[in-house]
Amino acid sequence: MTVGIERLAVYVPQYALRLTDLAAARGVPAEKLTAGLGVHEMAIPAPCEDVVTLAATAGARLLRAAAVDPESIGMLLVATETGVDHSKPVSIFVHDLLGIGHRCRVYELKHACYAGTAALMTAADWVRAGGGRSRRALVIAADIARYELGSPGEPTQGAGAVAMLVGPEPRALVLDGQSGTYAGNVHDFWRPLDRREAIVDGKYSIACYLDALTGAFEAYRTLEQPPLGASETLTDRLARVLYHTPFPKMAMKAHRRLVELDWRATPARWQALEDRLDDAAAESYRERVAPGLVAAARVGNTYTASLYLALASLLEDHGRALVGERLGLFSYGSGCCAEFFSGRVAADVGAVADAGVAALLARRTFIDVEGYERLIRAGEAGGDPPRDFTGKFVFAGVRRDRREYARPGAIAA
Ligand code: CAA
């Protein structure tokens, strides 16, 4: 049965900070952030936004663009590591705000940045099993990435959400069912229940990411059909490769590892080209990976949404030229769990390619470091939206221990 992503829609908060400004304020060379990490701008939510409003706005944009009746959604999965309650899931607030019907399976998923993929795979299995009958699944990945001010992680913050309609008529990406997974208990990045900012062992987290890529890609490679020829690599069969992107340089490191693994597993290629590995990996990166990193460099880390922001941005910019091509996707969640999987760009992608990425990025307001620090310290204060607010919902505040949400301009006194 054909299953995949029918359409994607993105939401990115309207405030952004230039990393050159952050570098100047922190006394580090701008090139360390723009070239060393590959990040140019990062998105900052307004005080009236939280993960619920980010997720619901992406969902509303998707339902509207796809002209889908909310009642026809049979499953709503929200993936996040920015949960708002130990018990009540983000998904049920989103279910309410989007006006989805009561006959719906609704829950939140967590495994660091991997949860978006866990949700997509769960939704695809549900569609394959016929659970939805004529109904579709709505998968939303949404996060606010926060580290301590002044810490090494600070330039890798960001915020955003991606909503995906998953069903039997994929017009964006047809999932081919091939997937390799990897999991193991590591302490590379985590956020204890009482903390707003993540704790991270930065260099170790990079090593864990690359180990997980090795495991997941090797598992994926063994499933390849038809088998690879004597001097053929799997990378030859992937038109583009998208990675979970905490910062764009991570995708470059990941692709270098992937090319090496792939070549080593193809002795004829390895013997002939071992000395050229760095150049060849860089060339392959420019062709296969860099085109998918445009949004990540301007939004920052969006945790669960990161891989899908890359997919949305790639299809929006290059989807029409990639019809029928196979994409490799790598998802990594600290802690850790990872998956390498693939899909083909659908024939009809031109009709659904606009996920709103370019339009949202063009409408952003750049703030200075002082304004950014004020917003970070204010946190999710709730209340009225700022002028030119681009979200569709606002967090009104907590009353009687209950989180309340409203349409912009409709906050009760
Ligand atoms: N010009 C150009 N490049 C420069 C430079 C300059 N003046 N100064 C330094 N650089 C380069 C460095 O050489 C380095 O590049 P390489 O890694 O290719 O050698 C790069 O800039 C970064 O420099 P440092 O390694 O010194 O940076 P740092 O230690 O201050 O912080 C970090 C880097 C550890 C990634 C930190 O930003 C961090 O902790 N980030 C959060 C954790 C993270 O994102 N981990 C990724 C894997 S885990 C994951 O993916 C899950 C998730 O979403 C969190």
Image (cartoon, rainbow, N blue to C red):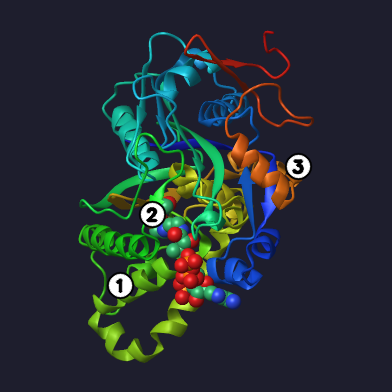
Residue type highlighted by circle 1: Asp
* Label drawn at residue 200: 2
Q: CA distance from mark 3 to mark 2?
A: 32 Å
| Residue at image location 70% in from the left, 19% down from the top | 408
Q: Position of residue 309 (x, y in %)?
A: 53, 46
Could you tell me which quadrant the C terminus lies in? top right
Foreground residue, 301 or 322? 301
Residue type highlighted by circle 3: Arg
Q: CA distance from mark 2 to mark 1?
A: 30 Å
Q: Is the residue 81 above or below the residue 392 in the image?
A: below
Q: Secondary structure at mark 3?
A: loop
Residue at the disc numbered 1: 262
Disc 3 to disc 2: CB gap under 8 Å: no
Describe residue 361's horizontal placement relative to residue 69 as left or right: right
Residue type highlighted by circle 2: Val
Residue at the disc numbered 3: 363
